[in-house]
Amino acid sequence: MALSLDILTLFPGWFAWLGEERHVRNAVDGGELRLGVHDMRPHSDLPHHAVDDTPYGGGAGMVVRVDTTVAAVEGVYGRPLDEVRAARRIIALDARGRRFDDAYARELAAAEAVTVLCGRYEGFDQRVLDHVATETLSIGPYVLSGGEAAAMVVADAVTRFLPGALGTQESAVEESFSPALDGLPEYPHYTRPLAFRGWEVPEILRSGDHGAIAAWRRAAAERRGGEPAGSEPDLG
């Protein structure tokens, strides 16, 4: 069953490249992904197709309106909001949302229909988060200018788990934070040249002993998992 993944945004041009990425194209061509990118502005009946307004209570910035967001959702699907919410997971990208991780990506890859709402400016009117979205998602504890970059992160990560996206499904099995590694970071990789400026490939990886190599890789992953973020353990 194909995943229907729609992205609603004020800047659809950001996503022009997404469908050309190899793994995304593989999933689309293989019938495993139906990807849609939709401009929210044409669905607004406000002057100049405005979608935002100043915040109640004062303050800097603009807020994406709840009425224009609902108009976009209902316009894209041609159905009342309640019916869309019953049929699809509607994810609003929000810095306070559920943290995106490997497990979340796998969960969305197994879904049938997902809609991602990209905020802008000061974000969405709270009523979008409370009554339009079925859930909120954050890719990290920092603020972006809009949800487009975050939506691409989600689409990229989710698509990798769809059959045929990576050419061979084994490519997505033993990766950082995957169940195969018990959520640990992936072990180090090496390729040619064997030696460069005195930096050599670990001898164990040249031994041909697959059992010993597997044990080394597991130990390296465990050491990486125990190190503070941003550091690199001694893998000798």
Image (cartoon, grey):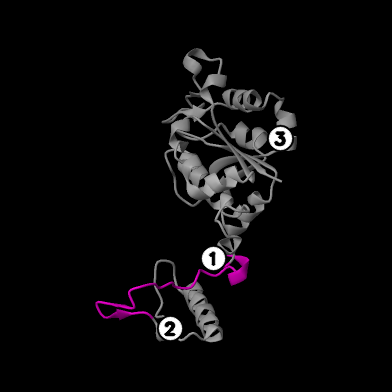
Q: Earlier in the sequence, mark 1 or mark 2?
A: 1
The 10 Å Cα crowd at callout 1, few under 14, some 14 to 19, many 20 or more, is some
Image coordinates for residue 201, horizontal then vertical, percent: 37, 79
Image coordinates for residue 124, horizontal then vertical, percent: 54, 33
- Per the image, the residue denoted by label 1 is 175
The 10 Å Cα crowd at callout 3, few under 14, some 14 to 19, many 20 or more, is some
Q: CA distance from mark 1 to mark 3?
A: 33 Å
Compared to residue 48, the image places residue 17 above or below, namely below
Magenta-tinted stretch: 174-201
Label 1: state its secondary structure. loop
Image coordinates for residue 200, horizontal then vertical, percent: 33, 80
The chief SS type of the magenta part is loop
**Residue type, mark 2 in image:** Arg
Q: Residue furthest left?
A: 197
Residue at image point 68% right, 51% down: 110
Is 184 colored magenta in this rendering? yes
